[in-house]
Every structure is written in C-alpha cells, then in structure tokens.
Image (cartoon, rainbow, N blue to C red):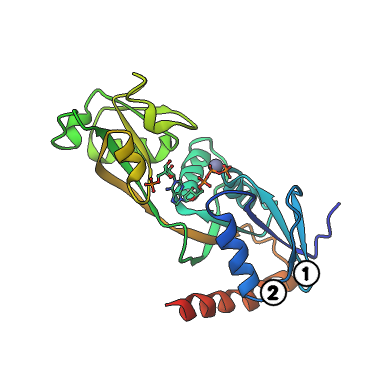
Amino acid sequence: MSDSRRLRIAIQKSGRLSDDSIALLKAIGIKLNIRDRLLIAHSTNENIDLLRVRDDDIPGLVMDGVVDLGFIGENELEEKMLERQAAGKAADFEVLRRLDYGGCRLSIAVPNEFNYESVKSLEGKKVATTYPYLLERFFKESGVNAKAVMLTGSVEVAPRAGVADAICDLVSTGATLEANGLQEEEVIFRSKAVLIQRADGEISDEKQALINRLVPRIDGVIQAKE
Ligand code: PRT
Ligand code: ZN
C-alpha cells in the first residue's frame, strides 16, 4: 500500500496537459523523478506522489477520494460531473485554481455544405461527440430535439463517414475543422486546465497545510508569466 501521509496528485500521463502540468509542479519547487512507463512518480523533496493516468480518469479519482488533487481540463471535469450526477454518484470537488494552459472550446461544427442558420437547424439531427452530457445539456437549454452520438475518437470524420450530420468537438486553432470541411457554428463550453481538490472532508491537516503552501506558489508562477 502507498503511504497515506503523502499527498497524491493525478496528472495526465501523456497528452496535451502533461508537459504543462509537470512544468508547473517543477516551477513551484517540487522535484520529481518521472520514469516514462511508470504509473507512480515520487517527489524527492516533498511528501508528494504523482499518479499518471488518462485524463478521463482524473475527475473520478478526485471525486472518489483516491487522490487529493488533480490537474484536468474543465471540459472533461464538467462532462464527468454530469455523467456521475446522472448515475446518482457523488460528484464533489473544489476548484483550487484555474490555470493558464489547456485553453480550448467545445463547439458544434457542421459540413461546409450544411445550410446552418441557427441552433434550430440541428432539429432532428445526429451530432457526433465525445462529450454527450455537455452536448445534451446544450440541446436541452436551447430547446432543440437533436441526438448526441458518442464517439471516443475520429469525431471530425463522422459526417463524411455518414455516421452523423454534425459534430461537437474541442477546437483550439480550428485547423482540424478546416481540414475536414467543417464550419464552427456554436461554442457550447470554454475550457482551461484547472487544479482540483477532493471535497469529501477526508484530507488530513498535514496534507491541507502542504496544499495551502503550494497554491500561493502557483499564483506566483502564473503572475510572473503575465
Ligand atoms: O490519452 P488521454 O485520454 O489522457 O488523452 P486525450 O486524447 O483524451 O486528451 P488530449 O491529450 O488530446 O487532451 C487533453 C485535454 O487538453 C483536453 O481534455 C482539453 O482540456 C485540452 N485541449 C486543449 C485539447 C485541445 N486543446 C485540442 N485542440 N484537447 C484536444 N484537442 C484536439 C481536438 O479534439 C481536435 O482533435 O485537437 C484537435 C483540434 O485542434 P485544432 O488546433 O486543430 O483546432
Ligand atoms: Zn482522454
């Protein structure tokens, strides 16, 4: 078993948030010994262990109290929160800080030849996405009867493949949409990376003191970059 006195932080193992999250931890003075293949990395100067996992798992690990902190995109966090609420599971967490990386938007895009006028143009349509709960919430709020079709990858090719009429996917530069003949029409969620903490009241005073020492350093690093 791992040492329960050590603060556990979940970060994405390999992906768009990994490098920035590790750089931030290093910038606030945490020395890390990361070996590529390993799930766990230990800090050599603080009572901290990193759990390196897929980003999809991070909200649940925090909400279930398996880890104390997590670095995660708000898009993934909000989606998993809605999914857990729908399943009647606890979905508590606290956002400690909104960070200065991982910026993107979740948008609905349609093929260039689609005659899009407003949200109502989606009535009766199928929209492929990896974020069905965020998309269904948008449909509900917009009063549109449309269907979210879940795809975990290659969302941008769904219309061409005849799987859906439109897509709802993350966008940063817009190059992927353009390369696939898609036009961005509705931004349904704006996201950045955030640092979250478990909110089940189970954190020891020692760990909380460590967190309280780390968070102002994060503010310092972000401010220094502005
Ligand atoms: O393996 P694992 O499950 O951990 O990784 P993943 O493949 O699910 O996630 P990853 O690493 O792609 O993204 C992690 C997080 O980075 C996302 O949840 C967002 O919070 C954030 N992020 C920021 C992005 C983007 N920008 C982004 N552009 N995530 C994905 N994209 C993809 C998008 O899905 C599309 O395929 O990039 C493409 C669009 O980019 P542009 O620049 O062409 O518009
Ligand atoms: Zn993922």
Q: Secondary structure at mark 2?
A: helix
Figure quadrant of the C terminus:
bottom left
Q: Which residue is mark 1?
A: 47
Label 1 or label 2, whichever comes before in sequence order: 1
Q: Residue at x 43, y 38 (%)?
A: 131
Q: Name the residue type under label 1.
A: Asn
Using residue 126 as the reference point, say whether residue 151 is left or right of it. Answer: right
Indicate if the residue with disc 1 has its beta carbon within 8 Å of ligand 1: no
Using residue 100 as the reference point, say whether residue 182 is left or right of it. Answer: left
Q: Secondary structure at mark 1?
A: loop
Q: Which quarter of the picture shows residue 29?
A: bottom right
Foreground residue, 66 or 152?
A: 152
Q: Which quarter of the picture shows residue 206?
A: bottom right
Other-residue count near label 1 (Cα within 10 Å), few / some / many at <14 / 14–19 / ≥20? some
Foreground residue, 172 or 197?
A: 172
Whole-percent x, y for residue 53 in the image: 66, 47
Q: Name the residue type under label 2.
A: Leu
Q: Residue at x 75, y 47 (%)?
A: 37
| Image mark for residue 210 | 2
Whole-percent x, y for residue 21 in the image: 58, 61
Mark 1 touching mark 2, by CB under 8 A?
Answer: yes
| Image mark for residue 85 | none
Q: Residue at x 22, y 30 (%)?
A: 122
Tell how many labels: 2
Other-residue count near label 2 (Cα within 10 Å), few / some / many at <14 / 14–19 / ≥20? some
